[in-house]
Amino acid sequence: MIPTVADGPVIWLLAGEASGDVLGARLMAALGRRRADLRFIGIGGQRMQESGLESLFPMQELAVMGLVEILPRIRSLSRRLDDAVRHIESERPDLVVTIDSPGFALRLLRRIAPLGIARVHYVAPQVWAWREHRVRKFPGLWERLLVLLPFEEDFFRRHGLDARFVGHPVLQSGAETGDAARFRARHGLSDDARVLILMPGSRRSEAPRLLPVFGKMLTILRRELPDVVPVIPVSPVVAGTVLKATAGWAVRPVIVTDVADKHDAFAAAGAALTKSGTSTLELALAGVPMAVTYRVNPVTAAIARRLIRVPYVAMVNLLAGRRLVPELLQEQCRPDLLAATVVRLITDPAVAAAQRAGFADVLAGLRAAGAMEPADAAADEILAMLPGG
């Protein structure tokens, strides 16, 4: 654990889900390399706590997604918001940094505005994708916005908001460093086994929607590819949920919770099915041919379709400006369609090669100017916001 110094500047950090926890831990490491006297408090997961964060309550209490899925949690989330506000009021940190989780983070930033504490939000709300009108509510929520995608800087500046592109953290993920032979040896897989990555999501509200479809898809897939081995990389937060949901599968999956083991699985993989989001960029960095699939509550889907303003859901497609990878969403998230898509990805070298060529172009645009690592660029922006910085 990184030691903290009681009389140094205090940075209050918030991460509400697994991806934010990883991002927060890297940010804390970069900040610590620049100033050893920083103290970190707030809300975060295991990785941030291992990096020295004093967490107010378990991050998992905030990990929920979906317009309908969140309704049963509103009361408990409201209580936790009150807890976070009181903690900031009592601790009076020198700076507040919220990471992603806009549903909780933006409410928190608004509530603490009267305290006069400098605020930074890291990972922009994706209002460019849907509900663009919400950007009118952002002035006054933060003093600086750190964005991950190259086009976001201009988008927010057009709306009068100070945004800084710091590069995408996937570039520091190590997803491309895996060892296929090590993965096969560790899990007793033959050289001929066809590894298929299944990524149902990092939230407990996501995985149960995709896993039943994946299980049925595998039954169909095995008829054509009998040597396929499903591998499910998940965060420890949802590992129990995944284990229970896959207990009855005809094909026993390899469930991976270790980050290095996940990267080894990527290196061994012939294809992947993943939800939309950062996981698509991880797989692209590792060169894994993929299709994106997703299923949410039908009411959530109906509302989202009326609001979404971008042509693609998959981040790699959005950045490429074309349908680089297949998108099988909602009604198309069907076992037969998924199985047919996986067969093409695994057995057609031309399909895989075309995707990999497109991945290279996408990834080249994700690094900020100066070739600085994303966490270091973000740390410099954040330290500049400290009093006397």
Image: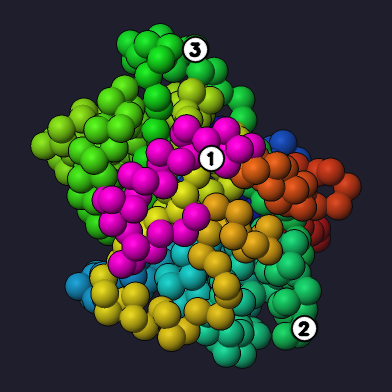
Q: Residue at x 71, y 51 (%)?
A: 362
Does 340 sit left or right of 25 as displayed?
left
Residue 296: % across, % down: 30, 66
Mark 2 is on which residue type? Arg
Mark 1 is on which residue type? Pro
Q: Residues within 10 Å of mark 2 (few under 14, many from 20)?
A: few
Q: Nearer the viewer, residue 262 or 147?
A: 262
Of mark 1 and mark 3, the one earlier in the sequence is 3
Q: Quadrant of residue 304?
A: bottom left
Q: Main secondary structure of the magenta part?
A: helix
Q: Which residue is mark 1?
A: 289
Q: Which residue is mark 2?
A: 158
The answer for how far apart the CA atoms under marks 1 and 2 are is 36 Å
Q: Which residue is mark 3?
A: 181
Q: Nearer the viewer, residue 35 or 301?
A: 301
Q: Disc 1 vs disc 3: which is toward the camera?
A: 1
The answer for how far apart the CA atoms under marks 1 and 3 are is 19 Å
Mark 3 is on which residue type? Ala
Q: Quadrant of residue 132?
A: bottom right
Q: Residue at x 53, y 49 (%)?
A: 280
Of mark 2 and mark 3, the one earlier in the sequence is 2
Q: Residue at x 53, y 25 (%)?
A: 267
Does 93 sit left or right of 56 as displayed?
right
Q: Is residue 304 visible?
A: yes
Helix, strand or loop status at disc 3: helix
Residue 97: % across, % down: 59, 61
Helix, strand or loop status at disc 1: loop
The image's colouring method is rainbow
Specify the segment rendered in magenta: 326-353
Exactly how many numbered labels are in the figure? Answer: 3
